[in-house]
Image (cartoon, grey):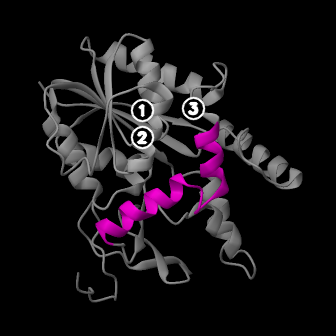
Amino acid sequence: MTATRNGATRICPVCGAIPTRALHVRDHRRILRCGCGLVLIDPLPSADAIAEREGEAFRGELMDETKEMFAAYGRNYRPDDPVVTAFQQHLATLGRLTPGRRLLDVGIGTGLLVHLARAAGWEASGVEICDEAAERARREFDIPVRTGDFAALDVAGGLDVITMADVLEHTHDPRAFLEAARERLKPGGVLYVAVPNHRSLVFLTADLLGRVPGGGVIADRLYVPNHYTYFTPATLTRLARDVGFEVAAVERENPYLGRYQMHPVIRAGLATLLAVSKATGLESRVVLFARRPI
């Protein structure tokens, strides 16, 4: 892709504009904010590089937390784990939004969401770009998984639900990803998307600290190597509507800190920040439920 007039190589996938404001410059990456509110990484790696990086993340080579997640949410998961109960709550919401029970999970991770869906009576399967993750999900939960890029795979349509938990921010083209989801849902089918919320107290704090000497390490903890687009509730809603969805609900939630290893002082500070974010409606994750029009 050729550079634009301000030196950027990416066009905003939400509004089509050229991002002009740099929030941070980290190594060879620029973190840009578009006028519509979307934040994106520039330059964007190639699709092959993104797929390779997902394998690195699965093996825990990008962040220790990723390795911990894959260890915590295999077959020996705790039923009372907040991540498990949140998935069950979201599945219940999906069950209220559609009477159908054909579900496809995109970016399955350990396969936990598909496992929980099948336990709740859904006819559920998955798609995963990382071969290692797909094999782990088959081994842990004996679930059907296809491997490859969801937007390019020949996936059967007529689905009642498509879920994408912590996936859209990893993709090469978020707009194409949601367009592919719309095509594969039947009329009235429901899309579930969960992503980090850039309009949150945690990101606001990191952006402020990232501009002071020595504060860049704080920004690096949030702008992780395999996230390329950062949504707000407004930008995610706009993109979903632009590709033809009717937005049914937008929710906010905070991540579960239990599986993260960190210094006790940092943990206490982050826990306080999350508590304040919940009280102010600035939680760190945004969850969208949208329907393909009938």
In the displayed structure, 74 sits above or below 259; it is: above
**Residues at discs 2 and 3 in contact (Cβ within 8 Å):** no
- Rendered residue at 34%/88% (across/down): 7
The residue nearer to you, when weighing 260 against 70, is: 70
**Residues at discs 2 and 1 in contact (Cβ within 8 Å):** yes
> Which amino acid type is shown beneath numbered disc 2?
Glu
Magenta-colored span: 46-71
Circle 1 SS class: helix
Q: In this view, does 79 lie to the left or right of 225?
A: right
> Which amino acid type is shown beneath numbered disc 1?
Arg
In the displayed structure, 52 sits above or below 66; it is: below
**Badge 2 or badge 3: first in the primary sequence:** 3
Q: Name the residue under label 3.
A: 74
Q: In this view, does 213 lie to the left or right of 132?
A: right
In the displayed structure, 79 sits above or below 147; it is: above
Badge 2 crowding class, 10 Å Cα cut-off, few under 14, some 14 to 19, many 20 or more, is: some
Q: Mark 1 points at which residue?
A: 138
Marks 2 and 3, Cα distance to the nearest angstrom?
Answer: 12 Å
- Rendered residue at 45%/28% (across/down): 113
In the displayed structure, 233 sits above or below 184; it is: below
> Can residue 255 be seen in this snapshot?
no
**Badge 3 or badge 1: first in the primary sequence:** 3
